Amino acid sequence: MKVTIKQWNAVAAWRWDMPEDDMCGICRNPYDSTCTACKFPGDECPLLMGECNHSFHMHCIVKWIRQESSQDKCPMCRQVFKAKDAVGHAG
Ligand SMILES: [Zn+2]
Ligand SMILES: [Zn+2]
Ligand SMILES: [Zn+2]
């Protein structure tokens, strides 16, 4: 199979201290891409938004919350993470 990349937006300046943008704060892959565990974007790897309005790949936040050290807190703002809604199919 031959994969043709039609659009390649190279990110020239990439810094660790970038404010949360349109990428997952855990794996730092873009929201429209997948988490590091998945290969194909789509319903298999949905986004999950917390009540703090931070969103992550569902797989990322689930993995994060399972770590004892996370204490169920959002890695971005340190509030207790509660899922608000699945992002995607709404309006
Ligand atoms: Zn992620
Ligand atoms: Zn995933
Ligand atoms: Zn948060």
Image (cartoon, grey):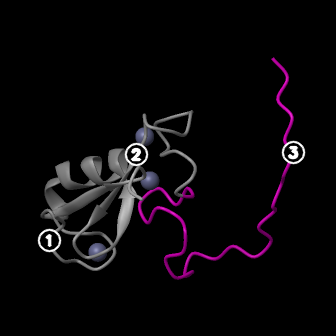
Task: Tell me the magenta residue range.
Answer: 1-30
Q: Does the residue labelled 3 lie within 8 Å of ligand 2?
A: no
Query: Could you say where residue 37 lies in the image, as x and y percent from the top left?
Result: 46, 37
Of labels 2 and 1, earlier in sequence is: 2
Tag shown at residue 36:
none
**For residue 12: magenta?**
yes
Q: Label 1 crowding class (10 Å Cα cut-off): few <14, some 14-19, many 20+?
A: some
Q: Label 2: few (<14), some or many (≥20) within 10 Å?
A: many
Per the picture, the main secondary structure of the magenta-coloured stretch is loop
User: What is the three-letter code of the residue carrying label 3?
Assistant: Lys
Q: Mark 1 points at which residue?
A: 80
Q: Name the residue under label 3.
A: 6
> If you read the primary sequence from the N terminus, does the residue marked by circle 2 or circle 3 appear first?
3
Image x and y of residue 84, in percent? 22, 63
Q: What element carries label 2?
A: loop
Q: In which quarter of the image is the C terminus?
A: bottom left
- Amino acid type, label 2: Pro
Earlier along the polypeptide chain: callout 3 or callout 1? 3
Q: Which of 22 and 74 is in front in this view?
A: 22
Neighbour class for label 3 at 10 Å: few (<14), some, many (≥20)?
Answer: few
Residue lying at 28% horizontally and 47% vertically, measured from the top left? 63
Image quadrant occupied by the N terminus: top right
Q: Which mark is residue 46?
A: 2
Residue 68 found in image quarter: bottom left
Left or right of 52: which side holds 12? right
Instruction: Tell which quarter ligand 2 is in.
Output: top left
Mark 1: amino acid? Val
Cβ at disc 1 under 8 Å from ligand 3:
no
Residue 64 % position (x, y): 27, 54
Q: Nearer the viewer, mark 3 or mark 1?
A: 3
Q: Residue at x 64, y 77 (%)?
A: 15
Q: Which residue is drawn at 57% across and 80% down?
A: 18
